[in-house]
Image (spheres, coloured by chain):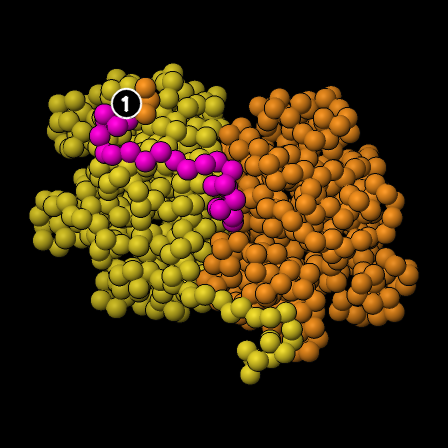
Chain colours: A orange, B yellow
Amino acid sequence: MSFVQKLVCVCCGREYRDDELNYYCPICGYQTGILDVKYDYDAVEKVVNPKFDSKDRSMWRYLPLLPVRDATHIQHLQVGWTPLYSAPRLAVELGVAQCYIKDEGRNPTASFKDRASAVGVMKALEKKAERITCASTGNAASSLAGFAAAAGLPATIFVPKRAPQAKLAQLLVYGAQVFVVEGTYDEAWELCMEASEEFGWYNRNCAINPYLIEGKKTVSLELIEQILDEQGKLPDWVVVSVGDGCTVGGVWKGLWEMKRLGFISEVPKILGVQADGCKPFLTAWQDNKPLIPVAANTIADSIAVGHPRNFYKGMQAIHESQGSFVAVTDEEIGWAMRTLARATAVFGEPAGVAGIAGVRAAVQSGIINSAETVAVIITGNGLKDIQSAIQFTGAPKRIAPSITAVKEVLR
Amino acid sequence: MSFVQKLVCVCCGREYRDDELNYYCPICGYQTGILDVKYDYDAVEKVVNPKFDSKDRSMWRYLPLLPVRDATHIQHLQVGWTPLYSAPRLAVELGVAQCYIKDEGRNPTASFKDRASAVGVMKALEKKAERITCASTGNAASSLAGFAAAAGLPATIFVPKRAPQAKLAQLLVYGAQVFVVEGTYDEAWELCMEASEEFGWYNRNCAINPYLIEGKKTVSLELIEQILDEQGKLPDWVVVSVGDGCTVGGVWKGLWEMKRLGFISEVPKILGVQADGCKPFLTAWQDNKPLIPVAANTIADSIAVGHPRNFYKGMQAIHESQGSFVAVTDEEIGWAMRTLARATAVFGEPAGVAGIAGVRAAVQSGIINSAETVAVIITGNGLKDIQSAIQFTGAPKRIAPSITAVKEVLR
């Protein structure tokens, strides 16, 4: 039933049978030997074109484009098919012709990462794993904890100490075993890798597990399908924040597949948005140099990734789509959070709204022109990080319970 | 285009033309003169039966059953058509034959209240209001702030000082004018009433605005339609937490309409769940006496309503459905939060999961029997109140970034 043909190492080009390996290319190792899942697109095309013929309003409507061998491992949670809004007031604020918002905060655990965790847990069950693990700045963690709970699969999660409280609360409520690592995300990630090997836990880390990005790409399949459904204008740019490189890699793969399958005639440009305090992709791209890991310093915890683990696929997304990277400050992220919420009622977390700030920066620097249409992926719900939101809005007025007090303030 | 026939006072029975009044019956006053919206159901039936013929996967698919005069006032936010899950593991835990979960935390601002705010803002625009206001324990407030932002309509919100931080953050991010009242919800409510009259702001308070409950009832229309779609077993009980009485009143009205329109042959019993520290409905119902307002003392802020403003419709729901009230302690709410999350991955706020605790209490006391099927409405997302969640789960382990530290803990 699966249309997967093979796994190909993005570093050395070696080919492997699907499920021959669990994670990365053994020759190149996990730092560079990332695998890409290849499908028999000629066969897929016959099934899905001219339209995806599914009543399923979730990411599983794209089953022919997913590495699923046994659909009984799919959990009940309704993931994907998140709302796509046209946001004319926001387009005016940003200085573009048209603006779409894809609200990924509406997923089961309130972030985009659910698309990947849904696949990760499905694969873990397929491989009869007894426990699943990941390291995460927060969203992948809470997402994995949720999907593991749904499946009744034990989970062990490594998060850096700076993970926001809301994401920690999710982990605990879902009953995962949680280790808060006294260190950075990068240290938590290495520790998770080590523990996974030591104890034989199934590893959901997106950079080294080739199947996860397949879940992530569904956001692009949906984005294009939803716009075509409404006979809307296809975007010139798809905009997303960048941490590890996996998300932007997934966004690119989905867009590329929609072209390969004949739904669109060209892949939109991708704008990858980093935080000013953590922009290893932007630096490497501007200087045309290899990755130099940095220390992360930004309020946007989900993209506070100083050592991106999927550098190859992250760079590929921008290069092959002829897109661009930009960086935005924490203040610009605060502006984006307020502006997005007030124009559309979509409340995003800092990394979630970084794309909005990125559009403004790209318009100001001439990367995006005012006649162009953008589609921005809001990767996580603002309720995931309340402290940052309050920092950007100030405290409310406290008054005594009397109309006099109200009049006092209004005067 | 509207099928609304008239407004009827639930207290004196006087009839009014739709839109003749803004809020309550002027003869009975706002404490008792609550209006009910009556439709021409014979005409509605011709349009919707045998099936709701709409591709719209939102609450607006029920347009013939909503008080909408001009659909252009409907905002873009995708509200309603929230996931319905069958939860077999949870059913075992609760000791019932089958259990459905309706996850209302998946609405645009993460609570059930969005169904009401969507109607409130629509009506405010219809009435050309320049500002909309409400008092709320938190969710109605953040929901109104979101929908008002979407419509570009200014909003003034009154919340009691105990409103959780996440709900406050939503208000501020959405750009509402916020008054944190140094007092209880009941005081904030009275103050809002006074300010609304004084300044001519459109009042979204659900108990006195007859149109709001029409939005709330859509949860029941959906619940039944989704179960029928999947050819599932209709529930013997629909379970929901009770604060003001408006939500349970809406739940009842929707179920009653599904019977009136021929979709079901009898209305399920309704289990209204209150907090042990705030149970004026339960007390009045057990003693068959009028309402006696109480001081609220519960972690479940959304149902911490000592003076329910829609006592009539709240009681009617339980009486007419031949249901029951129960009360649950904060500890039981904590148990329910963990148990629901670990069995289904649905993370609810305290009032949101009170229904789960209520089912257990009702099974233990013989109100619900083990052969029955329940459908529980989870009214708000757990991300709305992180402090309570953490209180119920404990803190995670902190470790140094070394495999030795991991082994230490696992030993």
Q: Residue at x 21, y 42 (%)?
A: B308
Q: Which amino acid does label 1 sit on?
A: Lys
Chain containing mark 1: A
Residue A344: give x, y in percent of width and height: 53, 31
Residue A112 appears in the picture as rendered: no
- Residue A370: x and y, percent? 72, 22
Task: Locate the N terminus of chain A by quadrant.
Answer: bottom right
In reply to whether residue A404 is colored magenta, the answer given is yes
Query: What is the quadrant of residue A145 in the picture?
Result: bottom right
Q: Which quarter of the rendering shows the C terminus of chain A?
A: top left
In front of the other: A377 or A37: A377
With respect to residue B228, does A176 lie above or below?
below
Depth check, front residue: A410 or B313 = A410
Q: Residue shown at 75%/24% (left/top)? A: A369
Residue furthest bottom as drawn: B411
- SS for tag 1? helix
How many numbered discs sit on the rendered protein?
A: 1
Residue B49 spot, x, y in % from top left? 41, 36
Q: Is residue A186 left or right of residue B27?
A: right
Instruction: Using residue B348 as the reference point, say whether residue B319 is left or right of it.
Output: left
User: Residue B301: horizontal and vertical position, in percent?
Assistant: 31, 49
Inspect this view and state whether residue A335 appears. Answer: yes
Residue at 82 percent of width and 46 percent of height: A284
Tell me where the magenta segment starts and ends, as one range.
Answer: A383-406
Foreground residue among A368 and A57: A368
What residue is pinned by disc 1? Answer: A407
The residue under the point 78% across, 29% down is A367
* Placement of B347 over or under B205, stated as above or below: below
